[in-house]
Image (cartoon, rainbow, N blue to C red):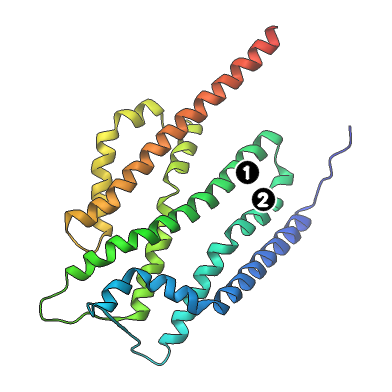
């Protein structure tokens, strides 16, 4: 059996330094690509408002000399982070994996890949959700007042909305991890479904900018569905683990 290669603390720190350098380089490159296509990306981000702009229900404007620069920088960074996320996960994985056992590598790879998939899925879902949310927000305008929206503030709102959607979509993974660690039981999660519905609506009431029921439902229903997906995924994972244990026991007794 080959002797395992050991590394000193300084070698680990050197590897970490190079990994962080590669991560920064990937983000800079993808951000540069995002800045190159920033006009196309801006049109995509403004698309949820297009119908209202054509009807003159909303007018977007720039209110300062640096607005254009800041808007394009934020859009480029957002595109860079989203596009580079899978590569960043692979780089972090290549740094962490050598120090893990096979079972730990399998678990961590599953977690890292799930984070990437769920985050991108959340951003996509959040983007299409804007086509429902924006007309509702415009409809709550004050009578007699014109909707002259600052483009920079709109992009900030979209940025936070999409980031929040990407983070919220991590809920199923969080539930699976909690069950796997034994901190929560699946039976408890199933019994507390009615409380999960209430919590989803409370969270939606806090984070949505308007008090109407439609907007709150748009946020609360996906939250609850993510909870159910997490419970299902945790149940499936636990069942699979138990089947693997039974197979191992049968092999040992056979």
Q: Check the picture and name the quadrant holding the C terminus.
A: top right
Residue 205 visible in the current orientation? no
Q: Residue at x 22, y 79 (%)?
A: 147
Q: Residue at x 89, y 36 (%)?
A: 2
In this view of the protein, which residue sits in the foreground, 17 or 168?
168
Q: Residue at x 28, y 66 (%)?
A: 134
Residue 109, which numbered label? 1
Q: Position of residue 167 (x, y in %)?
A: 43, 54
SS for tag 1?
helix
Which residue, given by chain and number where applicable, does mark 2 sit on? Answer: 93
Q: Kindly indicate whether the residue at mark 1 contacts the one at mark 2 (C-beta within 8 angstroms).
A: yes
In this view of the protein, which residue sits in the foreground, 227 or 37?
37
Pick whichever of labels 2 and 1 is earlier in the sequence.
2
- To which quarter of the image does residue 160 belong? bottom left
Residue 252 visible in the current orientation? yes
Q: Position of residue 128 (x, y in %)?
A: 37, 59
């Amino acid at each position: 059996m080959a002797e395992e290669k050991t590394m000193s603390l300084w070698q680990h720190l050197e590897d970490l330094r190079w990994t962080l350098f590669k991560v920064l380089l990937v983000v800079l490159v993808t951000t540069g690509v995002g800045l190159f296509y920033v006009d196309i990306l801006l049109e995509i981000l403004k698309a949820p408002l297009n119908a209202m702009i054509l009807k003159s229900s909303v007018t977007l404007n720039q209110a300062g000399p640096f607005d254009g620069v800041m808007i394009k920088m934020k859009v480029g960074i957002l595109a860079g982070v989203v596009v580079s996320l899978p590569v960043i996960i692979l780089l972090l994985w290549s740094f962490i994996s050598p120090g893990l056992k096979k079972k730990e590598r399998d678990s961590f790879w599953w977690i890292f890949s799930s984070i990437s998939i769920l985050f991108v899925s959340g951003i996509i879902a959040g983007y299409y959700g804007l086509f429902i949310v924006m007309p509702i927000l415009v409809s709550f305008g004050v009578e007699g007042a014109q909707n002259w929206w600052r483009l920079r503030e709109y992009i900030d709102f979209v940025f936070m909305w999409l980031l929040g959607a990407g983070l919220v979509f991590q809920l199923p993974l969080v539930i699976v991890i909690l069950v796997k660690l034994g901190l929560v039981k699946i039976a408890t999660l199933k019994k507390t479904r009615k409380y999960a519905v209430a919590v989803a609506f409370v969270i939606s009431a806090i984070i949505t900018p308007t008090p109407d029921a439609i907007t709150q439902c748009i946020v609360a229903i996906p939250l609850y569905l993510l909870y159910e997906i997490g419970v299902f995924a945790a149940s499936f994972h636990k069942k699979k683990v138990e089947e693997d244990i039974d197979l191992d026991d049968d092999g040992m007794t056979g």
